[in-house]
Image (cartoon, rainbow, N blue to C red):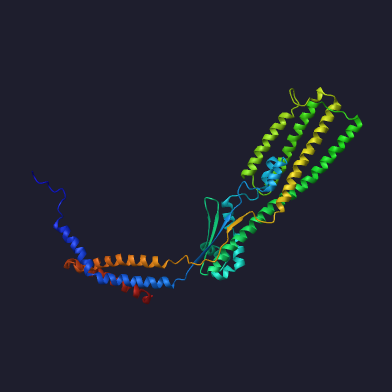
Amino acid sequence: MKRAENIYPEPEAGEEIKLLEILRVVVCNLPLIAKITGVVALLSLMASLAIRNVYTAKATLLPPQKDSTGGAAALLATMGGGGLAGLAGGLGGSSDLYMGILKSRSVMDSVIKRLDLQKELKTKNADDTRKKLLKIVKFDAGKNGIITIAADSKDPAKAALIANTFVEELQKKSLQLNLTKAGTERSFLEKRLVVVKQDLKTAEEEMRSFQEKYKTIKADSQAAAAIEGIARLRAEVVAKEVQLAALRNSMTDESAEVSSMMAGLSKLRKQLNSMSGTGGGGVIPSVGNAPAIGVEYVRRLRELKTQEALFEQLTKQFELAKINEARDSSSLQVLDEAVTPIRKSTPKRALIVIMSSVMAFFGSIFLVFVREYLAKLSPEDRVIMDEMKGALKGMLKLRRSAPQQD
């Protein structure tokens, strides 16, 4: 049998020489490489020891959930408030909303003023103080909705104080916004309720006078039922209009809540127009098909039922607005208050020394290869190198003498 041919090529002599040459350069310059690496490691250690420790304190918050509108909304729903229960929701449960409040100028200025940070951070004005504060305080909202406030400081107690101060100012601001919204709604509804009370009283007086004059003339049961249905729809329309006006006090027409409210109001109006038609086939008999006294009774009864339903709806809204305004605590929940950290967060001295030593090791190897290359230059290359050195020296002399000539 023939011997199997070797499928692996034999290394060329030039390659072995190059590899041995590289190893020779490294081994012969090991003292220099070790010296450079050791000096850099020592300097990086001294530099890292000179850097003061920085401590990080963290506080975590849980914003109110979207479905946790409280007992007021549940009570209103059981009372038949329907869509009005949404007024009990406060600011809502979006973490992004509270992140925006944390970064707002009013909250940051309150923290700066309470802790006198402009003096501590050594800044000239409020804008520079806010920018520098954002570098030492980080806000993060996780996918689970939990908000984290992390504050850095060379003083561990001060780091915890900054984080907890942000928590307190966020609670104050969110509470203020909730109370402002509830107070505006309560004031608006209170004024509207006074007008509705007077309208209801007027409708009752007119119905009483009409019944006394005509000895209680009544419409048939079908008309009465239709009137009650129309009255309820009219009351819902007016209540929606009041609720829309209240929302517009704190929101724009482009907001989702206002757009949804306007769409629902348009739908109710179409339904009311359909039920209140006076042509053939309408629910209410036309004026020409009923006695004049009966039609007048129907109109007065409809007005009375509308005012009663409207008064009931506005009373529910007014009571809910008062409950919201009476809330004396923020719906934000503090999961963890910031405590004084025991261990530093930075600098990582071991990592600094290791990375500096590794970079110095590879840099020194590159340096010895450059030295080896320059030592083996041919006469022609050495002449070129000398010319380059001369040109560089001439440029340096020109730069040094230029200021003296001026």
Q: Is residue 48 above or below residue 4?
A: below
Residue at the extreme bottom of the image, as rendered = 404
Q: From the viewer's perspective, is 12 left or right of 109?
A: left
User: Where residue 61 appears, x then y in whole percent?
Assistant: 58, 56
Q: Relative to 305, is 150 above or below?
A: below
Near-viewer residue (190 or 320): 320
Residue at screen point 36% across, 67% down: 356
Front residue of 280 and 143: 143
Image coordinates for residue 374, horizontal then vertical, percent: 22, 68
Task: Give the position of the N terminus as an image quadrant.
Answer: top left
Q: In the drawing, does residue 401 fall left or right of residue 18?
A: right
Residue 156 shows in this picture: yes
For the image, the number of numbered tags is 0
**x and y percentages locating residue 204 in the rendered image:** 85, 38
Give the residue at x 82% y 33%.
Answer: 301
Q: Which quadrant of the view contains residue 260?
A: top right
Q: Could you tell me which residue is drawn at 37 percent across and 72 percent down?
A: 43
Q: Position of residue 211 (x, y in %)?
A: 89, 32
Instruction: Please state if 90 lies on the left or on the right of 338 as rendered.
Output: right
Rendered image quadrant of residue 77:
top right
Q: Is residue 113 above or below residue 269?
A: below
Q: Nearer the viewer, residue 72 or 151?
A: 72
